[in-house]
Amino acid sequence: MIFFDKLHQNISQNQSLLFVGLDPNPEMMPGRYSSQDIIDGLWDWLQFIIAETADFVCAYKPTLGFYEALGVPGLELLQKTLAAIPSHIPIILDAKHSDLNTSTIFAKTVFTQWGVDAITLSPYTGQDHVAPFLVYPDKAVFILCSTSNPGAEALQQYPTRESPLYLQVVQESKNWGTPEQLGLEVGTTNAEVLARIRQVAPERMIMVRSIWAEGGNLNRILEVGLNTDGNGLLIPVPQDMLASANLSKEIQSLRAEINQVRDITVRDVASCSVWLPDVFTVKQHPLHDLILQLYDIDCIMFGNFVQASGAVFPYYIDLRKIISNPQVFNQVLSGYENIVKNLTFDRLAGIPYGSLPTATGLALRLNCPMIFPRKEVKAHGTRRLIEGNFRTGEVVVVVDDILISGKSVMEGADKLKSAGLNVHDIVVFIDHEQGVKDKLQANGYRGHAVLTISEITSVLHQAGRINDEQFLALTAE
Ligand SMILES: O=c1ccn([C@@H]2O[C@H](COP(=O)(O)O)[C@@H](O)[C@H]2O)c(=O)[nH]1
């Protein structure tokens, strides 16, 4: 089971967004455990915490540093602690790992030997450092975006308050992994920091930290951090509560306080004035995350854009940008692949320039030969209209990015046909709809699209990326 499914199962089973830090910090150990050997005392305390909280939390978060600080006995204590956690409760190892050279071996150790479900990572070594943790499909990472440490302010708020580095980290890390793989860790005493992060990452699970310092404003944290379904936040049990002999009672009353706000959030959304078909709230689009990521890397832009035909559209889709983002590019290729693999053909052809990288990626994935019709024939060299080798009579599937009027893709397909090739199928990523597929059919081509513009619009609206006005303008288009 993937990490986030396991997490959500516990959230609903225990009706709790609370997680507990399982930290053997001798300084915080309650006095009632101090008469014995320090490791034994810590172990008794950790066992007590697990026993008192297992029915009321959604996850445990042991902090590696506290165990390491105790030396070899500490690492043994970690193994005992991991084994003592009921297997249905996910474990997020708080490691803040950020060493590039050891990330592959470290990921293997924590995920396969220690059996933890997720890990916290520092972002500064970038995607290369995170990637080795993401090759484990059922595990997840939480990227540290902000900390409440006053000493970090100078970095986190750099260069300006309007465009601070911590938001850049959120924006960038969203490109590293899908919401099923990557969540965010946000340590802050300031709910406005969380509000800004939630705005940039409405779809991500956010593990908040440090919210209890300076009195804490739980209601405001929940107000700005919860998703419309009353989820999306993992909330720490306050450290001083873990020292209490009444832990179980106290955690239940905190859980009730949080759930009250969750209920109100869900009720308010249910009575929202804009009506949307139920299907959007019940069943998520299978390419939901990809659509959001395409929007976040600016492939989908809203505004007034003049098309080749002279018509003005309220959006422009620039899929050429995907080549700069391997993670998104891979998902786009999978979308095409799901269609192309069911077709019968000899070669793939991409329409220059925008669709050449996509056709190349697909040709490599499917291990099939590729060609492409030139935009213009050169006056020198081979003067070929079609680049690549082929035999007349072969069947070619044409790949392009987006169908607006269908003119450019049909021009490309016609060039292939004029060279003696057969083209029956045209596969694009986005269909602008408005009857363009019928137009292809009238010209002898079957059109296939990974997504339609209305699917994209609905997902963006539902996720809060576009407002009601934009949504209504686009659906009326
Ligand atoms: O949002 C858009 C609109 C158009 N393009 C480019 O145009 C063609 C599709 O237009 P047709 O009218 O179907 O010829 C497409 O291949 C793009 O090159 C775009 O990228 N984004």
Image (cartoon, rainbow, N blue to C red):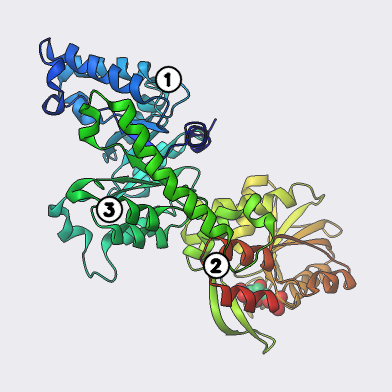
Choose between 270 and 313: the one closer to the eye: 270
Measure the alpha-carbon separation of dots 1 and 2: 47 Å
Amino acid, disc 1: Pro
Respond yes or no on whether mark 1 lies under 8 Å from ligand 1.
no
Q: Quadrant of residue 458?
A: bottom right
Q: Is residue 188 above or below residue 274?
A: above
Q: What residue did someone put label 3 on?
A: 217
Q: Residue at x 66, y 85 (%)?
A: 308
Choose between 357 and 471: the one closer to the eye: 471
Respond yes or no on whether mark 2 lies under 8 Å from ligand 1.
yes
Choose between 17 and 187: the one closer to the eye: 17
Q: Which mark is residue 320?
A: 2
For the residue labelled by badge 2, is the local secondary structure a helix, a strand or a loop? Answer: helix
Choose between 79 and 248: the one closer to the eye: 248
Q: Which mark is residue 69?
A: none
Amino acid, disc 3: Asn
Q: Quadrant of residue 381?
A: bottom right
Q: Residue at x 65, y 52 (%)?
A: 335
Q: Residues within 10 Å of mark 1 (few under 14, many from 20)?
A: few
Q: Which mark is residue 86?
A: 1
Measure the alpha-carbon separation of dots 3 and 1: 31 Å
Q: Give the x, y percent position of residue 98.
A: 27, 41
